[in-house]
Image (tube, grey):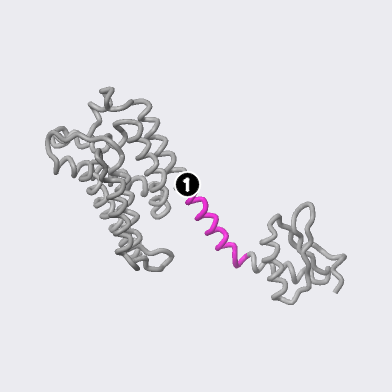
Amino acid sequence: MDLEVGTAVRVTSSRQRADEWAVVLAATGIAHRLRERIDGWAVIVSPADERAALEALDAYDGENAGQDRAADDDTIASRRATVAGIAVALLLIWLFAITGPRADRSPWFERGSADAARIMAGEWWRAVTALFLHADAPHVLGNAVGIALLAPAVCREVGVTLGLLALLAAGAAGNLLTAIVRGPGYVSVGASTAVFGALGILAVFRIVARDRGEPTRRKWWVVVAAVLALLALIGTGPDADVLAHLLGLLVGGGLGLLVGLARRSA
C-alpha cells in the first residue's frame, strides 16, 4: 500500500512514543510508517485506514492512561521528597548562621540545648530545639548532608509530611531518652539523632514493609549488618555521642516497624 501520500494520525516529539504507536498499529494489521518532521515524529497511515488507526491508538492510550498518571505521580512525589530533604538541610545551615557555634556561648544554646537536668525538670521541648543547634561548622555540615541524603528516602516511603514528622520524632525521642539515661550534667546539641533515626526507619522498612505488594524481608540480616556498619563508621568518632546515635537508631527502627506493619496489613 502506498503511504507516500497518507494521513498523520499521531505526532510526538518522542521517538520512543512513536515506536509504541507503530507497534500497536502493526499488531492490528494497519499499514503505517514513521516520518520525522519539524513538529516531531508523525505516524502516517493510508486515508482509508485513518479511522481504524485512530480507534486502535485511542484504545491503547486509554488502557495506559492510568499507568502514565501513576508514573507521573511517582515522579512528582520523588521530587517533593528530594526538595523536602534539601530544604531541611538548608534550614539547619541557615540556623547555624544565626546561632553561631557553641563556643560563642550564644543565648540560643542556653535556651535550646538538650540539658538533661532541665529536661528532667519539665523542659522537655529542649529535646526538639537541640536538633536545630550545632556545635561547629563541621557538625552542622555533616548532619545537613545526612538529612539531605536520608530524609528524601524516608519521605518517598511514607510521604513528605509523615516522613519529616517521623524524623523529628525519632530525633527528639532519642535526645529525651539519652538525657534520661545520662542524667544531670549531660548537655547535647545537633540533628545526628534524627539522622540515625532515619537510618533506623529505612532499615526496618526494608525488613518488614512491602514494596508494590512484595515482601522485602529477604536477607534482613544484610540490612541490619549494613546499618550497624554505618553506625560504627560515622557514629562512633572521638567526639560522637554514641549513646544518642544508638538510641536515635532504635527509636527510628521502632517507628519504621509501626509504619511498616501498618502498611503490610493495609
Q: What is the magenta segment's predominant secondary structure?
A: helix
With 164 as the anchor, is 109 left or right in this view?
A: left
Q: Which residues are magenta?
A: 62-80
Q: Residue furthest front?
A: 238
Q: Quadrant of residue 124?
A: top left
Q: Residues within 10 Å of mark 1 (few under 14, many from 20)?
A: some
With 73 as the anchor, is 235 left or right in this view?
A: left
Q: Quadrant of residue 103?
A: top left
Up/down of 255 relative to 16, above or below = above
| Nearer the observer, 24 or 230 | 230
Residue name at image x 48 percent, y 51 percent: 78
Residue name at image x 71 percent, y 76 percent: 28
Residue 165 position, x and y percent, is 33, 45
Quadrant into which the N terminus falls? bottom right
| Nearer the observer, 232 or 104 | 232
Q: Which residue is mark 1?
A: 80
Assign a secondary structure to mark 1. Answer: helix
Q: Is residue 102 magenta?
A: no
Residue 135 position, x and y percent, is 29, 31
Up/down of 183 relative to 28, above or below = above
With 17 as the anchor, is 150 left or right in this view?
A: left
Q: Quadrant of residue 92?
A: top left
Q: Is residue 73 magenta?
A: yes
